[in-house]
Image (tube, rainbow, N blue to C red):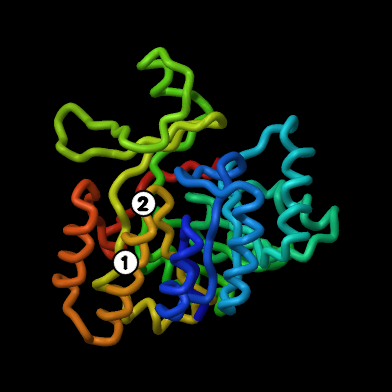
Amino acid sequence: MEIIVSLNKKENLLPLQQLKATHVLISDGYFSSGTASLNRNEMTDFIAEAHRLNLKVLVRLDRLYDESELNDLQEYLVFLNDRKADGLLFSDVGVKMLVEQNHLELETLYAPETLLTNSYDVTALKEDGFMGCVVSKDIPLQDSYQIIRDNPDYCYLRLFGPVLLSYSKRHFISLYLDEEREHRDGYYLQEETRDLLMPMVEKEKGSWLYGNCLQSLDKIKEIYQLPLRGVLFDGIIYDDEFVLTALRVHQQVLNDEITVSAALRQLEELERKAAFTSISEIRKTSLNKE
């Protein structure tokens, strides 16, 4: 089974390899929503070092792109292809079209947040030539199980990471503070009647609001029995230490080395601002497939 893990720093590739991951997920500062980012030279070095350690490299492209951005996006994809990146994790189907039109050797993994909610959605992607997909995080776990069983060795499942609640091209923080700059860390939205702090990220191309951090400790053994192509540990707003710890404790629970409660305590102690939700607690919500 493939294990995809997000990282921001090249020096953490060796610990990732030692945890038996297969893929590293990296981000730049413009074409993705990531809070940390790599410039072109850093991405080149990151890809080369990952390949030296026999890790494949996926690049995050989780924005929606305007018509005016397509030329720049195409140039970026050609750059990634030339640097031998292995694939793309993306949410805009225009990315796949550009890969095909330019005959690029980049694997296309489709990862929208809420669109893939039934087996036929995924079957349609296979028929259209997508190389894999990440099942929606917003549906009950048993529904995910059925989608995965109906499409064996094709689907990925998010096991860890902050749940994206909203993505907008509006700049909410800048409007409130009356200052035009990016706000990548330390900003939260808090509802009047709840203690929960919801992280917010605002960059040039939009704003992202996150909720609880998803974890799968209590269901990790069940999940690893599914005919999945892979799993995803994505700490897009968190540091590498937290993400690597999440991967390690999930593996320890899987191997009966520690209990679920002990593993969760480790995560809570490491990231005290995060509120955790088990993947088994996801319930049906009102989804609008747009």
Q: Position of residue 239 (x, y in %)?
A: 37, 54
User: As drawn, is 68 to the left or to the right of 124?
Assistant: right
Q: Is residue 240 above or below residue 18?
A: above
- For the C terminus, the quadrant is top right
Q: Classify mark 2: helix, strand or loop.
A: loop
Q: Of marks 2 and 1, which one's residue comes earlier in the chain?
A: 2
Secondary structure under the numbered disc 1 in the rendered image: helix
The image quarter in which residue 205 lies: top right
Alpha carbons under labels 2 and 1: distance apart: 11 Å
Judged from this view, the residue extending furthest toward the top is 178
- Name which residue lies at 62% across and 73% down: 51
Looking at the picture, how far across and down is residue 73, in whole percent? 72, 43
Kindly indicate the quadrant of the structure image that contains residue 243.
Answer: bottom left
Q: Where is residue 206 shown, x and y percent of the image?
A: 52, 31
**Would residue 172 be seen by someone viewing this image from the given angle?**
yes
- State the residue in front, 109 or 15: 15
Q: Which mark is residue 197?
A: none
Count residues near mark 1 (Cα–Cα under 10 Å), then give few for <14, some for 14-19, many for 20+. many
Q: Residues within 10 Å of mark 2 (few under 14, many from 20)?
A: many
Q: Is residue 157 visible?
A: no
Viewed as shown, does residue 39 lie left or right of 287? right
**Residue at mark 1:** 246
Q: Which residue is mark 2?
A: 238
The kind of residue tagged 1 is Ala
Q: Amino acid at mark 2?
A: Tyr
x, y percentage for residue 135? Answer: 49, 62
Residue appearing at x 25%, y 56% in the figure: 277
Q: Nearer the viewer, residue 187 or 216?
A: 187
User: Depth check: 26 or 263 in front?
Assistant: 26
